[in-house]
Image (spheres, helix red, strand yellow):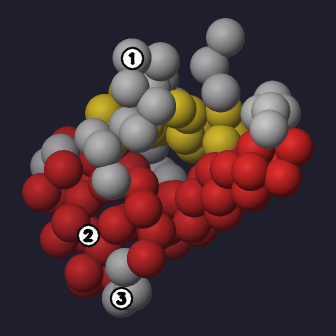
Amino acid sequence: MPQILYKDSKIQIEVYHRDEDSHILRINHQSYLLQRGILNELSRTTGRHNIERKLNTVDDRILLQLEEDSVDPNDLYLALAQARITELEKYAEYLISGKIED
């Protein structure tokens, strides 16, 4: 079962099962791999133009998918930040308790 960091009706971000430092971004039923460190980088990037440029570097189909599915890019930016916050909260919990909560 995937470790989901963020989920709403159109966007889901989860930990990639083969590499805990990578993530899967799902926009409706399309999946995109965010390799090691990309979620952290995207979540810390400011300015719509900068985020869009980085998303295009990751996979140029992501922004097209948002447009096709009528997903507001701001919703994705919020999802990326929220997923990273959740990941950091889980890590802090692990440091405190020694175990990861799902």
Check disc 3: other Cα within 10 Å, few if <14, some if 14-19, many if 20+: few
Q: Tell us which disc is closer to us: 2 or 1.
A: 1
Q: Of callouts 2 and 1, which one flags the residue occurring earlier in the amino acid sequence? A: 1
Q: Can residue 1 be spotted in the picture? A: yes
Q: Which residue is pictured at 52% across the width and 32% down the height? A: 15
| Residue nearest the viewer, comparing 83 with 7 | 83
Q: Are marks 3 and 2 in contact (CB under 8 Å)?
A: no
Within 10 Å of the Cα at label 1, are there few (<14), some (14-19), or many (20+) other Cα atoms? few
Q: Residue at x 43, y 76 (%)?
A: 44
Q: Secondary structure at mark 2?
A: helix
Which residue corresponds to mark 2?
Answer: 52
Which residue is more in the foreground, 94 or 14?
94
Relative placement, left or right, of 52 versus 45 is left
Q: Residues within 10 Å of mark 2 (few under 14, many from 20)?
A: some
Q: Amino acid at mark 2?
A: Glu
What secondary structure is marked by label 3? Answer: loop
Residue 34 to residue 52: above or below: above
Res 21 → quadrant: top left
Q: Position of residue 69 (x, y in %)?
A: 44, 43
Residue 60: image location, x then y, percent: 14, 49
| Quadrant containing the N terminus in the rendered view | top right
Image location (x, y in percent) of residue 83: 61, 53
- Three-letter code, disc 1: Arg
Residue 75 visible in the current orientation: no
Chain-order first, disc 1 or disc 3:
1
Q: Is residue 19 left or right of residue 5?
A: left
Any mark on residue 18, and which?
Answer: 1
CA separation in Å, label 1 and label 3: 31 Å
Q: CA distance from mark 3 to mark 2?
A: 9 Å
For mark 3, what is the residue?
Answer: 47
Measure how far apart labels 2 and 1 are at the Cα level. 27 Å
